[in-house]
Amino acid sequence: MESGQTRDGARGGGGFVWGAATSAFQVEGGAREGGRGPSIWDTFATRPGAIEDGTDGQVACDHYHRFPEDVALLTELGVDAYRLSVSWPRVLPTGVGATSAAGLDFYDRLVDALCAAGIAPWVTLYHWDLPEALQQAGGWAARATVDAFADYAALVARRLGDRVTCFITQNEPWCAAILGHLEGVHAPGHQDGAEALVVAHHLLLGHGLATQAVRRERPGARVGLSHLYLHVEAAGPQLEAAARELDGVFNRFYLDPLHGRGYPEDVLAHYEGQGFLPNGLAHVRPGDLELIATPADFLGVNYYTRARLGGPAEGPLTEMGWEVYPDGLRQALLRIHRDYGPPSLVVTESGAAFADAPDPDGVVHDAARVRYLEAHSAAALAARAAGAPVEGYFVWSLLDNFEWAFGYTKRFGLVRVDFETRARTLKDSGRWYRDAIAAHRAAEGGR
Ligand code: FCB
């Protein structure tokens, strides 16, 4: 660790944290190694048609074996922090009970390598890879999974918390609940609105219990959740009610309970109307809302795009078909600051997929990604300058990786991965990020 740098990556004096992010299932591979148990994404990937290119996460970027090379790439970028996730079934193959020594050792080595490089590890506890054994017992729809998650969180904090300060409990509950249990396009691939809402509640409850469990193990830890923020706009006044509803199901349904307001009445009425609450709120037990509202140390904001109702996109589209709209990030951070006032905001994901390919010399000129990252990091800094307590910015992603239902067809990396050889090549965006970090630090009076 360099002098003046705190354990969460800020280089003293209120410095801004520059980072890059990945998640376990998307990069690790090593799916059968070290006693790792199967996760719901292993199972889902075997379902015909579930993954666009018919691939899976068995090898992915082979980060499980190549992590030293990836830490060297992070060093080359000069990031302060690296957001990784722990694979629950790698450390607890069936989700509860017996731990895998090899799995825990893997994260020990990874965290040690990061610390030796002066890079602060930010650890996500749940980035969607539920142990399959827990899914067999009902998955996130079963309340027992919430308790299992808190125990797992305590285990990870116990093992890594001497070197890890920042923990993210849940990544994007909306995706896990809705894409996984209503739309059926993510694992476990269910299409049941009532189940999806129970799952959403249990994910949030898991956040609250895990926050407390981590703090019990490590009183100095900082804990938060990463929310996928959708910036919603109406193209005309007649669409304002629809925009409020969409903002409700995406944003308020999660942010309100996290900040002590319970579930928003209008969104509950909307779901009631869809038949998704056949038993009302019977799954919400006394005390749950208080647990969900356990004060967090920061809120992670994952931002990609806006939804513009009733009108065409105005900016260019990424390879995901998502409109490039950087000002939505500035507005998101200011709105969350104004409406909810979390003590700190961290952009825990920001990035774009483009169909970039190497030129004959093997160089990847991903100018569109450079423009995207330049504009979005500037938007985060603009929100900070306007008074929102924005603490850092993490690019999604360090590496091209397994983009869930899209398999390897969508590339988000600062680093290209050749999925035949697993060779890594820093893209132009990686070089741009390295220079931008250095310039920002120099302007802040850093090293
Ligand atoms: C987010 C996910 C992340 C990645 C990006 C593109 O919703 O958290 O794993 O897939 O989208």
Image: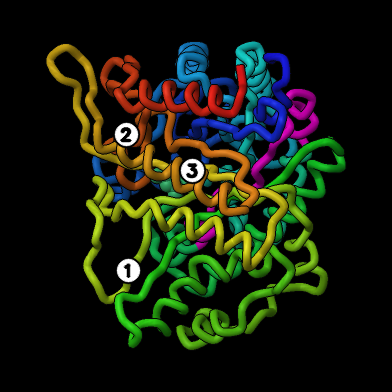
Q: At which x and y percent is residue 52? A: 26, 45
Q: Is residue 43 visible?
A: no
User: Which residue is identified by label 2?
Assistant: 370
Instruction: Tell me the number on the disc at residue 308.
Output: 1
Residue lying at the far left of the rendered structure: 360
Image side of residue 152 versus residue 51, left or right: right
- Mark whose residue sits in front, 3 or 1: 1
- Residue at image location 63% in from the left, 34% down from the top: 123
Nearer to the camera, 441 or 417: 441
Q: CA distance from mark 1 to mark 2?
A: 24 Å
Instruction: Tell me the number on the disc at residue 104.
Output: none
Q: Quadrant of the N terminus?
A: top right
- Mark whose residue sits in front, 3 or 2: 2
Q: Considering only order in the chain, which callout, 1 or 3, is on the residue closer to the N terminus? A: 1
Instruction: Using the rendered view, name the quadrant where residue 378 is placed.
Output: top left
Q: At which x and y percent is residue 184? A: 39, 60
Tag 2: residue type?
Val
Q: Secondary structure at mark 3?
A: strand
- Residue at image location 57% in from the left, 35% down from the top: 85
Q: At which x and y percent is residue 387? A: 62, 53
